[in-house]
Amino acid sequence: MNPVSEIVTIDVGGQIFQTTRQTLSLAGPKSLFSQLAESTGLAPRFIDRDPELFSVLLSLLRTGNLPSKAKAFDVEDLVEESKFYNIESLLVDALSHHSHFEAFNLEKSLLLPLNGRDSPSTVATTPLGTLHVAHGSKITSFDWSLRKKATILTQFTAMDSLLAISPSLAAAGATDFSGLQILDMEKGFVRETLNWENVTKSGSTVQAIGSSPGLLFSSFESSRRNSNCIMVYDLQTFSPVTQIGHYEIFGANLDSAIPSTKLQWVESYNVVMASGSHSGPSGRLGNIKLWDIRSGNVVWELKEKVDCFSDITVSDSLSAIFKVGANSGEVSYMDLRKLGDEESSKWVCVGDERKVGNVRKEGVGCKIEAHGNQVFCSKEGNIELWSEIMMGSRRASERLPDRVFRKNLMGRVKDMGGARITNLGFGGNKMFVTRKDQQSVEVWQSSAKGF
């Protein structure tokens, strides 16, 4: 190799490859590729590895994508080879990046069996597709490639809330067990237990968990069910940062009695959405609040009385809150950009707008989740896919126009139907689905991407 040349010659398993220093440096300073780029020897550097796998990884460096011939190799072989060259993160990003998620082209591609007889109660994912599944007293984890599986036993009888902090760290809680536990998923032990000390000094159960890039949120309710709050922790140290929404319940004040059962961070508005509902003699009541963490104040609130949500979600990409009505079973949205306008801060039905007084309560048990620019809503064993239709531009002086959402077909007809859906999760380029009384997780993936 000419020391002044930008061309680098490498001998891998007897096959000669030539590339540039610039290409090799794209692998990062800690990679073997970067070391090859800095080599000044005259002879080609010899690496005793598989040349065909090397060819795939070199192509990944050159283009940022895997070549089509990569599908001829087993994922585990590519992973092990990427670990040798210390570029596993580049391979994971190429195989499981969220940009490869194609909502209209999803197909049921895999069934992940779970150990034991318990059905999944909740699931949690990381951005690159690591999956944690709570079933009974156990949590089963699958790595981003879904090839490696591990199960740990927890102190819970069953879990109602689960958050994936990282591929090896999760936060778990239950409505009948005191404390929020931070679990090491690799070693199977409780790293830390977080508690909220209420006025009555009784134990506090977890109703919901959420997070922002630097904070962890947990909704607590006292064991006596007479007080609740949302605690905010530092996501790195798990030390308490602040406390918001602390309510002590007196008499028949039902509004204060409703703890938050869903917490979602809204990055664009720098707020956390907290929602909860309660079924009583007068029907189902609920509330939705947007909290400013810095001031500890509610910046917007809505009390739900008519067709209260069965489930609710917020989409940062679409700047909207979506719900599925407990009575009607219809999907409605509220535009976050109009929340300051009292006349416009109302639910807009995107479906058939059935009578909200439907005694059949068609929305009970339905799940709704937003991912990217789409909204997914489960109806019994089926999934509806909603997306926004752009209706053209507007002048700066004009008011925001009404938005139009349409229901779309998704994937193959043969994949639809089955037992009632209990959870929807999204990670990397995959959608995860669990169903009632089934001890497995369905993996939905685009047929055009991945392995």
Image: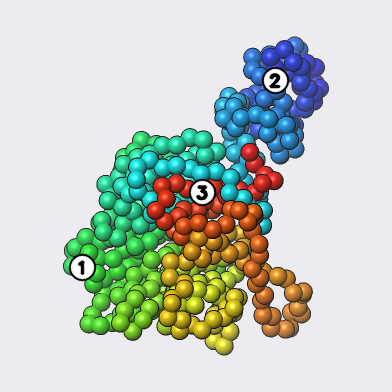
Which amino acid is tagged 1? Arg
Q: CA distance from mark 3 to mark 1?
A: 38 Å
Which amino acid is tagged 2? Pro
Quadrant in the picture for residue 276 = bottom left
| Residue 191 visible in the picture | no
Q: Secondary structure at mark 3?
A: strand
Across and down, in percent, residue 273 comes to 46, 68
> Where does label 3 land, which residue?
442
* Quadrant where the image shows the C terminus: top right
The amino acid type found where label 3 is placed reads Glu
Residue 51, numbered circle = 2
Which mark is first along the chain, 2 or 3? 2
In this rendering, the answer to whether 95 lies above or below 252 is: above
Few, some or many residues within 10 Å of mark 2 (<14, 14–19, 20+): some
At horizontal 34% and vertical 62% (from top left) the residue drawn is: 207
Quarter where residue 57 is shown: top right
Q: Residues within 10 Å of mark 3 (few under 14, many from 20)?
A: some
Secondary structure of the residue carrying tag 2 is helix
Secondary structure under the numbered disc 1 in the rendered image: loop
State the residue in front, 413 or 289. 413
Residue 35 visible, this angle? yes
Q: Residue at x 37, y 68 (%)?
A: 260
Q: Which residue is mark 1?
A: 224
Crowding around mark 1 (Cα neighbors within 10 Å: few <14, some 14 to 19, many 20+) is: few
Q: Nearer the viewer, mark 3 or mark 2?
A: 3
